[in-house]
Image (cartoon, grey):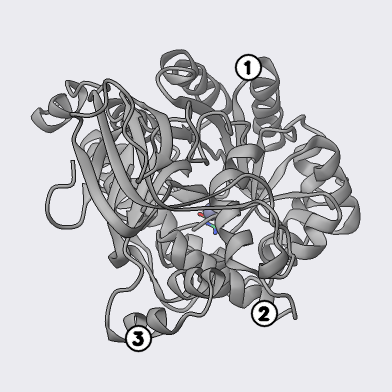
Amino acid sequence: MTDSSLALASRSPVSGRWAVRADLLDFVDDPGFAAPAEAPGVRWRPDHVLLVDGERIAAIQPASAPLPEGWTDVPVVDRRGQLLMPGFIDTHVHSPQLDVIASYGTELLDWLNTYTFPAEKRYADPEVSRVGAERFLGALWANGTTSAVVFPTVHKVSADALFKVASARRMRLIAGKVLMDRHAPDGLRDDVEQAEKDCVDLITQWHGRDRLAFAVTVRFAPTSTPEQLAMAGRLFQAHPGTYMQTHVSENRDEIRWVEELFPTARSYLDVYDREGLIGARSILAHGVWLNAEDRAVLREYGAQIAHSPSSNLFLGSGLFDWMKAEHEGVNVSLASDVGGGTSLSMLRNMGDAYKVQAMQGVRLSAWKALYTVTLGAARHLGLSDEIGRLEPGSVADLTLWCWAKGQVAEHRDQLARDLHERVFSWMTLGDERNLLATYVAGNCVYQADEPTH
Ligand code: GUN
Ligand code: ZN
């Protein structure tokens, strides 16, 4: 362990009592695709004080009310007039791909071979993995993301490194080493036996420890042999509480390739289903080209699609029909899919999600988008008692935002006529530069300028 990771590990998870005063926005239910003015589930508490005791939210009250006994002397982060929200949840993102974000000129399969696979090879080196994990998780916090479902690389050490940094900061992280035993270059393939051993080691060491969970991480059907997919299914079934993450039906050339490789499967999704890889804890990125039967299968299991609008636009993959998926009972969360996606900022990803829906004649309200990256994702992950809401008892994973940064946004903010208009223009024009501070389990992990706590 290096000096910096020792320093992280020795931080006390419990920082005592403190409070923050701001305008609170969160959700108590799914606003759906209702018009903003009629949307249910929105909870707006202007000028409130949120009290934090150790890792958790202790109470929330109007700023005008006297503080309870025992709280009168606690430090108060005074951010009146600014926005406090639960930390955002990114349900699909690749930690090593900060090295290839914004790479020019390709669709999925060429992009993997040209940029991504060569970059991921470097993570065999424990030092590259360690520095990369610190850089990546620091970047998530600097974008307002406090929980994530992450693909590292095929190397066990890359998963270990992520878990280590997340554990030291008491972060909610779901990850696992990537499984890929074919159609990948030298240095980036495992084999069934070693992969299983590595996964079992990682489960033993990290799963259920602190706020960490293991995900059986099948890269995608083309890079695993049928034998490896069968092993992955057995692992997922044998270890209750683990998640499963993969990609499905993202790109049309990819789908044609899967059809060639698995001619007896009913569909791309079926390649996973018949190996026992689909369940309520399965997170499948993209699903742009699923058919009605696939959606029915996802609904039956309660599995979720991690819709990745920035990535789908950047890699030219297609337009995900979010409303149809939800009308047919599929759980949908939102994800950056960096480096296919071009920003870790969930504000930017929500802005892209709006545009993807607009291309299909559907309007995505700020309420629906923000619900999805907070309570919606928490519910689909089975974690809504812990994250996603500003609620006594929830873990204090918090983000503080300023409404507008720069002339254009400030001007637009001043002209907003109602709350949705204000929040929507913030979501659409804002990004990580609007972020003032991020707290994970009650500790400040990012602050924009002067110390806030
Ligand atoms: N399919 C298989 N691997 C990847 C990846 O790294 N990114 C995306 N967007 N799709 C994939
Ligand atoms: Zn991905």
Q: Are marks 1 and 3 in contact (CB under 8 Å)?
A: no
Tell me the distance, in whole angstroms, between the alpha carbons under discs 1 and 3: 53 Å
Q: Is residue 367 left or right of residue 360?
A: left
Tell me the distance, in whole angstroms, between the alpha carbons under discs 2 and 3: 24 Å
| Badge 1 or badge 2: first in the primary sequence | 1
The residue depicted at 45 percent of the width and 16 percent of the height is 201
Tell me the distance, in whole angstroms, between the alpha carbons under discs 1 and 2: 41 Å
**Can residue 334 be seen from the camera position used here?**
no
Of the two numbered discs 2 and 3 in the rendering, the one whose residue sits closer to the viewer? 3
* Disc 3 target residue: 411
Task: Write down the quadrant of residue 108 in the picture.
Answer: bottom right
Answer above or below: position of 189 versus 423. Answer: above
**Which numbered tag is attached to residue 175?**
none
**Which numbered tag is attached to residue 358?**
2
The residue depicted at 78 percent of the width and 49 percent of the height is 330
| Badge 2 or badge 3: first in the primary sequence | 2
Q: Is residue 94 left or right of residue 251?
A: left
Give amino acid for label 2.
Answer: Ala
